[in-house]
Amino acid sequence: MSADHGKMNGLHGPKHKRGDLDRELNRFAGTRLEDLAGEIPSLCKDQHGCRYLQKKLEEGIPEHRDMIFRETFGHFADLMTDPFGNYLCQKLLEFANDEQRNLICESVALDLVGISLNMHGTRAVQKMIDYLSTPRQARVSCSSILQIHAIIIALSMNVVTLIKDLNGNHVIQKCLNRLAPEDNQFIYNAVAAHCVEVATHRHGCCVLQRCIDHASEAQRMQLVNEITYNALTLVQDPYGNYVVQYILDLNDNRFSDAVIRQFVGNVIPLSMQKFSSNVIEKCIRVAEPSTRKLLVEEFLSRAKLEKLLRDSFGNYCVQTALDYADPAQRLSLVEGIRPILPLIRNTPYGKRIQSKLQREQMEGLGGQFGGYHHPAQQALVNLAMANGLNPQIQQAPQSHGLVQRGLHHAASMSELYNGPSPMGYPLGQPGLPPQRQQQQLLHGQQLSAPGLDQYGSHLQTSPSGSLLGGPQGAGGYGPANGYSMNHGYGAPGGNLGLPAAEPVYAQHGGYNYM
């Protein structure tokens, strides 16, 4: 029994299966196409029969092409959605003459939307559009115009349905890629009429971006006007925010300034939302100076600023505002942050802001102005940070020149971060007695600017489709399509000059570790 069982396994093993496959491939060897008359529609749905018919088309014999066309013409809509038959349809579209293509387009027009939504049919329809958009004559033939017109009529009533479908959206994108802008006007009309529905869909946001890419000037204005009108809604959506960012990335002030001004008056709530906070940061970066001033102005309220600094998304918007604000507004921001900083210094966000300001302050000591756009900004920030200076250090002799100025600034930072808190207890390193904090303060005065390169920042960026095909931003989140930005401030710190017997506090990304 065991020997017989072994023989049966051998008959059904890999070698036996390969033999069956070889026999299938050789089944049509030496067979004339004329001998298969009446069987071609069924052969189209057979893997090996379909390959045999494709090879006959590739031979370029008009009689064979015409015979295959006659027998498959009435079954084209069915064959285009078949796992094997769709390949024969694509091959027949390639080798058919203009008259045959016209007949094919007419025969499938009523079913074209259903075919486009099918995982196999979408490929056949895309191939059809490819061949219709590249006529063999140098000039566009009348037959090609008729074929394109038939496609437009068939798809025009279901554009939004196709855009939102996993398979159908590729047909619309093929039209955008291959047809002339004027032929695609039916797509732009549908998208403009259903802007929010399309832009807030995972596939729709990608298609909308491709529409902008392939648009004529008039069509681009048509879409941008609708996006601008609905910007406040789109910016809060997981997918719609990428569409708004795409407009900002066009680097065209005609479009971006109008979009940004839609957010004036709502900057604070938008800064504290997961998706819209990304857009607010980008708005601050790309806005015209006058428009940027309107955005930053909304951060200057003490109550709103404290809420933003405590928020997991809003704090990034504050940091971006610090980087791009004009000198006067930056001074106001620093003045507003200073009394709040002791209250939030033990939060990740407070430590990050503290590290940022301290790093930039110390970079200024070495003659470098860090992220400031002008030396005047550094001077203004130094002035703001110096409001609580130690009187003894302020009255110190000036004979030490540059070294003395370094001590002055070091004392400024120590006073800012280690001074008395409103609650009545010291704000030095946690766990240290007041005497030790004073010793640490005096020791910190001996630090020089080059020794403070322990502070750093790291901005990580990662690549869209589209949306668009996902979608990240402040706080490390995002979709499809396509843009991510993870913020991280702070780098491993070094020994700050404390005696060896004392614990050394190092900063890692804004957190204190012992």
Image: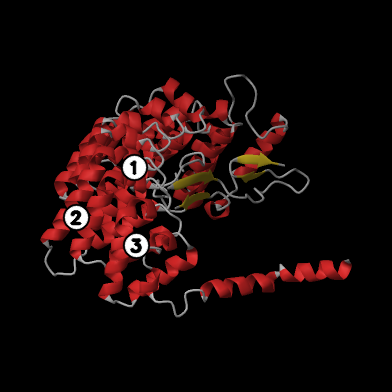
Q: CA distance from mark 2 to mark 1?
A: 22 Å
Q: Which mark is residue 90?
A: 3
Q: How is the image coloured?
A: secondary structure
Q: Position of residue 501 (x, y in %)?
A: 78, 45
Does residue 459 appear anywhere in the picture? yes
Dot 2, how many residues are within 10 Å of its Cα: few (below 14), some (14-19), or many (20+)?
many
Q: Is residue 281 above or below residue 147?
A: above
Please tell me how crowded label 3 is: few (under 14), some (14-19), or many (20+) other residues with Cα within 10 Å.
Answer: some
Task: Report the residue at 58% width, 31% height from top.
Answer: 345
Nearer-the-camera pick, 386 or 36? 36
Q: Which part of the image, by quadrant, shows the N terminus?
A: bottom right
Q: Please name the amino acid that badge 2 sits on.
A: Gln
Q: Identify residue for label 2.
A: 147
Q: Is residue 167 left or right of residue 212?
A: right
Mark 1 / mark 3, whichever is N-terminal: 3
Task: Name the residue at 26% across, 51% down.
Answer: 107
Residue located at (69% from left, 32% from top): 430
Please name the amino acid that badge 3 sits on.
Gln
Q: Which of pointers 2 and 1 lies earlier in the amino acid sequence?
A: 2
Q: Which mark is residue 163?
A: 1
Query: Which residue is at the far right?
Result: 1
Density class for disc 1 (Cα within 10 Å; few <14, some 14-19, many ≥20) is: many
User: Of the residues shown, which amino acid type is indicated by label 1?
Assistant: Ile
Q: Are marks 3 and 2 in contact (CB under 8 Å)?
A: no
Vertical comparison of 347 with 503: above or below: above
For mark 3, give the secondary structure: helix
Residue 335 position within the rendered picture, expressed as x and y whole percent measured from the top left:
42, 30
Closer-to-camera residue (389/280): 280
Disc 3 versus disc 2: distance between alpha carbons? 16 Å
| Label placed on residue 287 | none
Mark 3 / mark 2, whichever is N-terminal: 3
